[in-house]
Image (cartoon, rainbow, N blue to C red):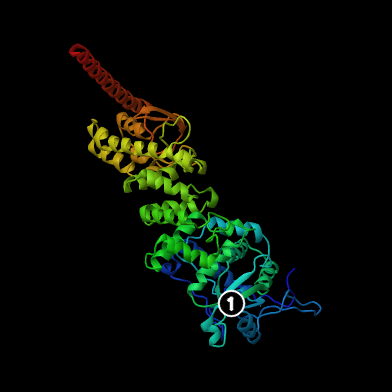
């Protein structure tokens, strides 16, 4: 129910005003400051703008938190509110201080670990779970880090500049929910309920030695959130963290890194809700980062998948390490990351295909060849089609050039051709006037009559499995290759047998 002691202002766009004394102005971060989370953070900044320009929230940053109130007809909070003098005493004596605050007194753009990607899906999950109607943070206590230098200076810093150590996603979800309700035309009564929650935010202040401890504290909090796996670090997020800290610490060894993690995050090294940070984990994280994730092209693919959280194709450090190790070359690694994502989007692959047994070919009957081997083979075949087969065909040069341009990357191919299950297909006007032979040629590269492709005895490769819809090739062309290879192997085998027979006969004759 809306608090009765808060009266909404008249409708209309409020004028921009300077921040009240002691309250820091809300300033959106630069894209650089937002780091990997620039896109998500810009969306959050837009939500903040929409909320604080609403008449009910126009002066929210300057309002005092609502404390416990027994007066008839007046709103009440659930705990004593922030008082700086009281807080300083508690912080200096115990290192912590609990009270009610105005949520707007946080630095709402502050990112404790901008080098770690934030999953959009996590923000949406928190919104769906807690903020589908007016609600606050009673179940999601906000934690604020206060540096020792601030306490030594006799205060907590300016209101509006407080640095949060609790998960970013929670605050982002709250403002996203309010902004969406404003866009939906929610009335002032509902907005007052949201404002009441903003002014009765439960918070705990924690004393920290220095700014470096902010990031470590934020990581530790996430590892302690056992009841809410949505906020626990994913494998990819932990890889980014490990890689960034290695850079900050001067390229220290895996053993040194593990020692730091155990010191800061406890015996598991930060394994709560996910893979534990062990020596093996750190070794693999270094390998994955150096061979793959540091590259912008692969990083883009992985972060797109990361928005799916546990459904991501790259939600396992062991799986990604296996992929990188088996693929070997930079070209193969980049191709396979994109191919796996494309296969998932085409509905042919899921996270279950990223287990070691599938990637390495340890499934019974696979003859030691797995998904990575298959994708490397398809990459080789694609290169042959584009660089040898297509140029040899008797069709106009501009069409050959267009086919090559369309098929040069997954992004370009899908932009031109889409997926077979797309509700709206891309405009195919670029193929207007093409001869039937050219269409057939493109179809040879693109088409696959079935989702299941059986490839047998290609250099020992034997698979019968759902595979990624990369640039699928016509069966006849694949089988031509198969037969060629089989005949080569049969010929070699016969040749070897003949030589062996001749040698045997010669030995017998000499004897």
Residue 27 position in % (x across, y down): 49, 75
Front-lying residue, 93 or 508: 508
Q: Is residue 243 left or right of residue 176?
A: left
Relative to residue 500, is residue 316 depicted above or below? below
Q: Is residue 137 left or right of residue 214?
A: right
Q: Is residue 466 among what the camera can see?
A: yes
Residue 430 position in % (x across, y down): 34, 41
Q: Which residue position holds label 1?
A: 105
Q: Is residue 342 left or right of residue 433?
A: right
Quarter location, residue 21: bottom right
Q: Secondary structure at mark 1?
A: helix
Relative to residue 453, is residue 246 depicted above or below? below
Q: Is residue 362 left or right of residue 164?
A: left
Front-lying residue, 346 or 116: 116
Quarter location, residue 76: bottom right
Residue 237 position in % (x across, y down): 48, 58
For disc 1, the neighbor class at 10 Å (few under 14, some 14 to 19, many from 20) is: many
Front-lying residue, 509 or 32: 509
Residue sitting at 40 percent across and 39 percent down? 470
């Amino acid at each position: 129910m809306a608090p009765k002691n808060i009266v909404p202002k008249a409708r209309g766009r409020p004028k921009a005003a300077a921040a009240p004394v002691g309250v820091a102005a809300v300033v959106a971060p630069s894209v650089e400051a937002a780091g990997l989370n620039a896109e998500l953070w810009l969306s959050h900044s837009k939500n903040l703008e929409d909320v604080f320009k609403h008449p009910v929230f126009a002066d929210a940053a300057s309002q005092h938190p609502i404390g416990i109130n027994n007066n008839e007809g007046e709103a009440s909070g659930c705990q004593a509110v922030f008082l700086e003098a009281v807080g300083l005493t508690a912080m200096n004596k115990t290192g912590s201080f609990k009270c009610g605050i105005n949520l707007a007194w946080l630095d709402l753009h502050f990112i404790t670990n901008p080098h770690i990607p934030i999953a959009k899906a996590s923000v949406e999950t928190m919104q769906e779970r807690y903020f589908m109607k007016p609600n606050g943070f009673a179940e999601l206590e906000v934690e604020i880090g206060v540096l020792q230098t601030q306490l030594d200076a006799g205060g907590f810093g300016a209101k509006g500049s407080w640095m949060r150590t609790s998960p970013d996603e929670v605050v982002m979800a709250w403002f996203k929910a309010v902004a969406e309700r404003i866009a939906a035309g929610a009335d002032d009564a509902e907005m007052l309920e949201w404002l009441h929650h903003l002014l009765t935010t439960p918070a705990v202040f924690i004393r920290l030695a220095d700014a470096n401890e902010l990031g470590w504290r934020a990581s530790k909090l996430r590892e302690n959130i056992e009841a809410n796996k949505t906020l626990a670090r994913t494998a990819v997020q932990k890889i980014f963290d490990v890689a960034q800290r290695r850079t900050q610490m001067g390229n220290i060894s895996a053993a040194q890194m593990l020692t730091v993690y155990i010191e800061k995050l406890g015996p598991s090294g930060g394994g709560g809700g996910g893979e534990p940070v062990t020596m093996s984990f750190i070794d693999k994280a270094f390998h994955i980062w150096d061979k793959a994730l540091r590259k912008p092209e692969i990083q883009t693919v992985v972060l797109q998948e990361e928005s799916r959280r546990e459904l991501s194709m790259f939600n396992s450090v062991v799986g990604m390490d296996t992929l990188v190790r088996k693929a070997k070359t930079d070209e193969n690694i980049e191709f396979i990351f994109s191919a796996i994502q494309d296969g998932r989007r085409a509905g042919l692959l899921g996270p279950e295909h990223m287990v070691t047994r599938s990637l390495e070919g340890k499934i019974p009957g696979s003859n030691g060849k797995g998904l990575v081997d298959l994708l490397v083979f398809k990459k080789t075949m694609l290169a042959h089609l584009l660089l040898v087969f297509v140029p040899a065909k008797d069709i106009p040069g501009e069409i050959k050039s267009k086919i090559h341009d369309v098929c040069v990357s997954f992004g370009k191919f899908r932009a031109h051709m889409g997926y077979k299950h797309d509700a709206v297909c891309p405009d195919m006007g670029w193929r207007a006037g093409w001869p039937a032979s050219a269409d057939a040629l493109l179809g040879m590269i693109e088409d696959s009559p079935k989702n299941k492709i059986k490839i047998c005895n290609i250099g020992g490769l034997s698979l019968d499995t759902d595979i990624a819809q990369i640039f699928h090739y016509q069966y006849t062309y694949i089988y031509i290759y198969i037969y060629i290879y089989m005949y080569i192997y049969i010929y070699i085998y016969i040749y070897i047998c003949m030589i062996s027979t001749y040698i045997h006969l010669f030995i017998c004759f000499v004897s």
